[in-house]
Image (cartoon, rainbow, N blue to C red):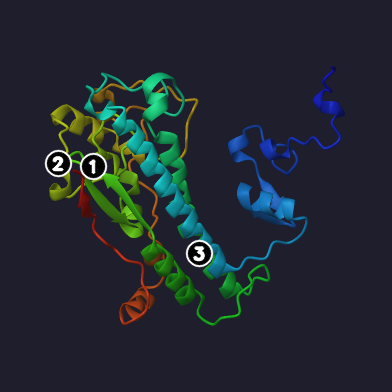
Amino acid sequence: VVVAPDSELPLRSDEQFFGTEMPRATQWMGAPFVYKGERLDYYDYVRQAVAKGDVVYDPVMETRLMVRELCDDLHYRAQSIDIAVKAGLNNRAQPSRLPDNIYGTSGDWETYSTPSRDARLKTSFVELKDQIVRFVEMAKTGDDKLDYAGTDIAGDLAAVYGEEAAACKVSYTASNGEVRELGFEEARSRVFDFSFDPYHCPELRWGARDPAELATCPDGETKRAWYDAQQRLRNQVERTYDVRMGFTLGQLKAAAPGSGQDDAPETDVMAALSAPLRGTLADGGPAAPDEPVRAVSTAP
């Protein structure tokens, strides 16, 4: 068997790595993707390219599907956390430093931690908000790529977002065996507080801040200090596989280079829409719920 070199493959292209424009980008993270004169992000460009023509967006259906996909991702995360808890990682002592890179390593951290999964989840929440805002702007400008015949796109998107958010519930098992339920909006509001560290209690893994919810977490002063110090790492959505991250607790507290960012991106869809719109919804429309976590059952 003789494998053909890349140069002989008729459909080969490095466009996905370096963009569509000449001269080619030298760093893939800065690669530009342009379709019919419009610069798009990578995923929108791929969607246009594989469709072999102009993609038309149904904003109501797109919003509905994006929320449902995020709900699925929250459930997948719950399964991942349960696996780590069943393996007893949260009962072990906190290591003295992080792995060389939290996104790609080996051993228990690679098996049971969730920094990459959480980064994808956080990115999706940010993109959901950005995409909904984009749909509203497209409607204002009469963009022909938008398939929308209504007269109040902001209200319609808020309504479908609220409907799907209300239908999404995710549960986790607390340290005392109690099963607790989070609504979609509650999960969204604390997504940057979700701990990716498998040595933390389930309550911290799900970003608990309320003293009543945290009361069942057995983590002592050292683990709580690690959780607080990892906030800057939780604030970032980029998965930086090329950065050394074997930080100690002291280095995290000192905001060492490569240890994240001070502020998290905004994910609040309803806040991105108008304040008068939220008032109208509160008078009777289906605004997105902002439910606190609640216990739904207790394990035997």
Query: What is the distance, in whole Å, between disc 2 and disc 3 at their CAs?
Result: 35 Å
Q: Are discs 1 and 2 less than 8 Å apart at CB? A: yes
On the question of residue 122 being in view, the answer is no
Q: What's under tag 2, amino acid-wise?
A: Thr
What SS does tag 2 mark?
Answer: loop
User: Is residue 255 toward the left or the right of residue 122 in the image?
Assistant: left
Image quadrant holding the C terminus, namely: top left
Q: What's under tag 1, amino acid-wise?
A: Glu
Q: Which residue is mark 2?
A: 216
Q: Are discs 1 and 3 less than 8 Å apart at CB? A: no
Total number of numbered discs in the rendering: 3
Question: Where's residue 263, x and y in %?
Answer: 34, 45
Q: Which residue is mark 3?
A: 64
Looking at the picture, tell me which residue is in the foreground, 296 or 75: 296
Query: What is the distance, in whole Å, between disc 1 and disc 2 at their CAs?
Result: 8 Å
User: Is residue 49 toward the left or the right of residue 10 in the image?
Assistant: left
Question: Which mark identifies residue 30?
Answer: none
As drawn, 270 above or below 45: below
